Image: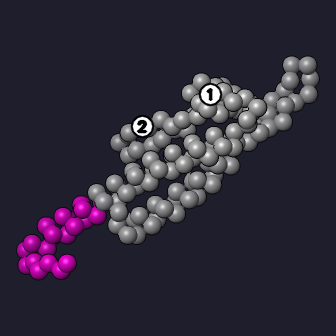
Amino acid sequence: MAKIVGVNQLADELTRTMKKYNDDVKRGIEKETKKRAKVTVDEVKEKAPKDRPEYYKYFTRSKRTTSDGLSYTIWNKKYYNLIHLLEFGHAKVGGGRVKAQPHMKPVGDKNIKEYEKEIIKIIKRGG
């Protein structure tokens, strides 16, 4: 809706409008970040090796608020030390190697691209 302001009030009105836009975009990005973190955890659980049911059940996300904003870490609560071994493979005690079973990197790469597309949409529509 158009608002008529005088020349003297123009700077104040621009400041208010930009602050509202900034707040709306920030809220939109935080909402998308939370949603994308949940989707990523669900997809990692789906792609994780199923030969150890206790492994894939413990994937979760942890929220962290910093001065830059909101961020999430996707990790395994109980078997965090197995992620690297399963993702990249490892040497066996008696010789040979265990084949890599990538399940976090492919899901992360896919979701980062989708997240970036959504952030651009949020910025363009103003929240």
Q: Position of residue 99 (x, y in %)?
A: 84, 36
Residue 14 falls in which quadrant of the image? bottom left
Q: Which of the colour schemes (rainbow, by chain, secondary structure, one colour) is used? A: one colour
Q: Position of residue 24 (x, y in %)?
A: 30, 60
Q: Residue at x 40, y 70 (%)?
A: 124
The answer to whether residue 55 is above or below residue 114 is above
Q: Residue at x 44, y 37 (%)?
A: 63
Marks 2/1: CA–CA distance: 18 Å
Q: Residues within 10 Å of mark 1 (few under 14, many from 20)?
A: few
Q: Position of residue 80 (x, y in %)?
A: 62, 27
The quarter of the rendered structure image containing the C terminus is: bottom left
Q: Residue at x 28, y 57 (%)?
A: 23
> In the rendered image, is residue 49 in sight?
yes
Disc nearer the start of the sequence (2/1):
2
Q: Which residue is mark 2?
A: 64
Magenta residues (range): 1-22
Q: Nearer the viewer, residue 44 or 117?
A: 44
Q: Which residue is mark 1?
A: 80
- Residue most extreme to the right: 95
The answer to whether residue 106 is above or below residue 113 is above
Residue 8 shown in magenta:
yes
